[in-house]
Every structure is written in structure tokens, then in C-alpha cells.
Image (cartoon, helix red, strand yellow):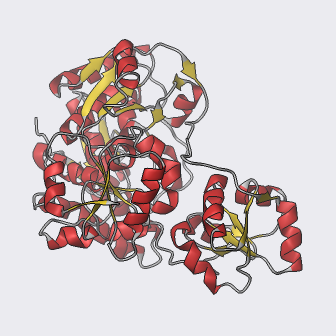
Amino acid sequence: MTKTVFPRNLLDWLDDGDEIAVLDVREHGVFANGHLLIAASVPLSQMELRLDALIPRRSTRLVVCDDASEGLAERAATRLAQLGYSDVSVLEGGVEGWRGAGYEVFSGFNVPSKAFGEFVETAYGTPHLSAEQLQAKIEGAEDLVILDSRPYDEYNRMNIPGGIDAPGAELVYRVHDIAPDPSTLVVVNCAGRTRSIIGAQSLINAGVPNPVLALKDGTMGWHLAGLKVEKGADRRAPEPAEEALAKAKAAAQSAGERFGVEYIDAATLKKWRGGEAETRTTYLFDVRQPEAYNAGHLDGSRNAQGGQLVQGTDEFAPVRGARIVLTDDHGVQSVMTGSWLVQIGGYEVYVLAEHEGARVTGPEATTALGFEPWETCTAVELATEMKNGGIAVIDLAPSTRYEAEHIEGAHWAVRSSLATDVDTLKDSDNVVLTSEDERLAHYAARELAETGRSVRALEGGTDAWKKSGFAMASGATSLLSEPDDVWRKPYDTTGDPRVAMQAYLDWEVELVEQIQRPGGISFRKF
């Protein structure tokens, strides 16, 4: 029988010092409309693909929640038990029960980190300038550099003209060669506010001699000021030369000492990830950029660019009270990342002092829990059957990906509601499921087959169909489920982007006050 926990008891659990993770199993778009502050968005439809990385210890205390109207939490609790998780409770009344008990409910994504960014600006007085002020300095040919603290893919999509990509934790590592003259103004930007503030304050905390300013409201503020962005830029901050690297190491060490960053050796890490793995959760994050991680990293480490880890602790480390161990090549990115995680609180934070050791190459490997292959068909076989008729193809990719490109003639659905949504199809007795990650289609096929239908998974997923040269289509057509599986960023909205951007920026600023209410959070000020 599923255990339950009442909101008041959960509030006590969150403050008792033991490890705990709150998992909201609704789709991302629903989650973003209102959720507990410390909840991680882990949709039931994707759970098996994400759990091993997010909740590596099977005896972790878990609380599952939803909106208490569709039974998703109970289904998730059952599935978690099947996957070996032994301490699972369902939040009584779900998110509305939490709200009804007088505790705050938050909208949006990465809220703890977003709130932290606003806290940092308020607590430390991070200096900034507006888009109009920056444009005037550019037009006046002032001595300045613009560093974009977002990952390269976000930067490449659109950036402030002339900006150079230097993702969050890379700023202190790379700035000394980019702005060697201490009189050069360094302006840090992101899409909105958080990474601009954290990035600028990182340079200030590390004692960089240059004047440093955060671009108020980032690229959104630039848009709202009526200024044009640059698209497709590929300027990236270079690896530091020897002298610049020495400066970066000294700067990071100074910041680490100020914020009490602790170090461990390889033997301690081995003990934590070995004999103590059943009693404590230890996350090991390599905080370098993906290219560096793929070229060689410690076996068992996950790639979490430092700036993104600070930006989204809920996405990477949902277990509150867990240990977080950070690593890189030189002890700069990891120490700077650690200095922020210490201030956010909620974890024991350490930097791995040793940068040598056995390395593996390639992207991060993922483990799909409880995976059992299901019957498949090839793209060629599917194309023949679709031509003959009497078959339904259902795509389980994120709705935005389906909208951009999908198999011609395919329908779209969310796995968690597929068993009922498929009833609207006339050819629903013979179904082929496809997905970006082929494993998702196999999970869903097994479940759908329990309704008595003939179900197969497309071998190789949608990518195999495309590589075979068969027809693709686009558009949000043939939707069987409500497309509430994704949260659209303000500049991706289907409405007026300017209205969405301003609303988003206002929401960020208001978080400082909101987190002080019951059900909120507090941060450390040094």
C-alpha cells in the first residue's frame, strides 16, 4: 500500500537534515504552472530514463506529488517500488494540498537558482548597466568586452552583437586573456537575469581587477529596448595561456577560501562512491564544457557545466542533503562552481583536489531502469505498412520536436496518457510507437500492449526513418494528448514574445520576496 505524507510533515522532513527528494511527476508544462519550490520535475512519462542519474541511491527518501486529480503520483510510486526504490511516499492532496495548508507554490523552472540570483544581486549589490547604456558604450567605441555566460548552443542562437561565449564557470578561467588590460570594462550577459548576475559577481568575487557589470535583463532586455541581436555567432573564449591560467587559479583559490570551499582526495571519493553508496548520495559532476568532458573524464562522473549546475540545481541534484563533488582539469571551474553551491545551501559541497587519474571518453552514458526490449519493426517495414493502411504511428518525442519535424502521417502523444488518448484513433488496434530515444517507445509499447492492441516500436526511432530517406513533416497536427509536456521559454512563446519576456523578467525579480513566505527557502550570505 502506498504511503502518504501530509504537507506539515513534509515541511518538517525538509528541515530534519536527512536526505530527501521531492519528485513532481506531471509533465514539464504543467509543473511550470505551479509546484513546490524544492520539487524536481521528473515526468512519469520519462522517469525510467532519468532516475538512475538523479536518484542513484535506491533507499533515498522520496516524496512524489502531482495535482491529485489524475493519479499520476500513485502510478509513479508503484513504478518506483518496481524499480527498487524502497522509501516512497505520496504527498497528500498534491500541490493543491500544499497550497491549501498555507505554503507557497511557485511557477516557472529552476526556481531555487533563479531566486538565488535575485538574492545575490540584492545581498551583494552586483553592479549592472541597461541595454541602452551598453549600446551607447559600443557606439562610443569604449574599451569593453561582452562575455555571454550561457552554453554555446544558446549563445549561437542569438547574442548581444560582439559578445564572446564564456559559459558561467568558465569566466574566471578564461577572462585574463580576453581582457588583459585591467581598465577594460567586462560586461556579462545571459538570456535574462540569473546568469548575468552570477557571472558578473563571480568575476568580482574572484578579485578580477577589471570593472565588471552585469547586463540588466540580458538578451531579453536588449530585445525590449528595440535593439537587434546577432544570430549564428561562433566566437568562443580561448583556453587560457600559461600566465593567464596561473592568474585564474589564484583568483579561484581566493574565492574558494572566502566561501569555505572544501576539498577531498581520490581515496575519499572512492570510499563515498563505494562502501558508503548505500547510506549517502554522492553526485560527481565534471563542470567543464561538453567538448572537454567528452575528450576525457573520470569514469562515473556526469557532465554539468558549472554555470548550468548553479542555474539548475533541481535538474542535476534533486536529493537535498546529498554530497556534491566537483571536478575539472585545473581546479578553477570547480572551485568557482563550489563557491556558489555553498551559498545556495542544501548540500555538502566538495572539490576533488586531484585532477589526474583514469579517464574515459565520449558523452555521458545513461542507464534506463527496468528496460526490457519490445517487438520492433524497421523503417522500411513501417513505410510499407503505412502505404497499405490500417496502422497508426504515434510519436512520443517532446511536442516541440514533433512540431518541428516528424514522420509524415504520425500522430503525437504523451506516454503517461497514451492508453486513453489512443482511443480517439480509428486504426488504434495496430500501433507503431516512435521516439527520439528509442527506449521510450519500448517502455510505452509494453504498457499499451496491455490494452490488447498490437504494438511495436520503431527500430532506431524517428532518426532511423529520417536516415532512410522517408517523408518528414512539420507542424502541431494530429495531437492526441494535450501539448503540456514542455515549458516554452519567453522567446519561444506562441504569443507576443515581448509581453512574455517582460512577464518573465518581472517574475524573476519578485522571487526575492516570494521565497521568504512559508514553503520558501533561505540562502547563505558571506
Q: Specify whether residue 226 is in view.
A: no
Give residue 65's position: percent from left, percent from top: 32, 63
Question: From what the image shows, is residue 383 above or below residue 144?
Answer: below
Question: From what the image shows, is residue 421 above or below residue 167?
Answer: below
Give residue 188's position: percent from left, percent from top: 33, 44
User: Is residue 420 or residue 495 the one in the foreground?
Assistant: 420
Q: Residue furthest front?
A: 1
Q: Is residue 289 left or right of residue 95?
A: right
| Residue drawn at 52 percent across, 36 percent down | 290
User: Is residue 370 or residue 243 the one in the foreground?
Assistant: 370
Quadrant occupied by the C terminus: top left
Q: Specify whether residue 453 is in view.
A: yes
Question: From what the image shows, is residue 211 above or below residue 452?
Answer: above
| Residue drawn at 38 percent across, 36 percent down | 306
| Residue drawn at 61 percent across, 31 percent down | 362
Q: How many marks?
A: 0
Give residue 504's position: percent from left, percent from top: 31, 67
User: Is residue 203 or residue 507 the one in the foreground?
Assistant: 507
| Residue drawn at 31 percent across, 31 percent down | 279
Q: Is residue 421 left or right of residue 507?
A: right
Q: Looking at the rendering, which quadrant does residue 265 occupy?
A: top left
User: Is residue 41 or residue 203 the one in the foreground?
Assistant: 41
Quadrant occupied by the N terminus: bottom left
Give residue 140's position: percent from left, percent from top: 34, 49
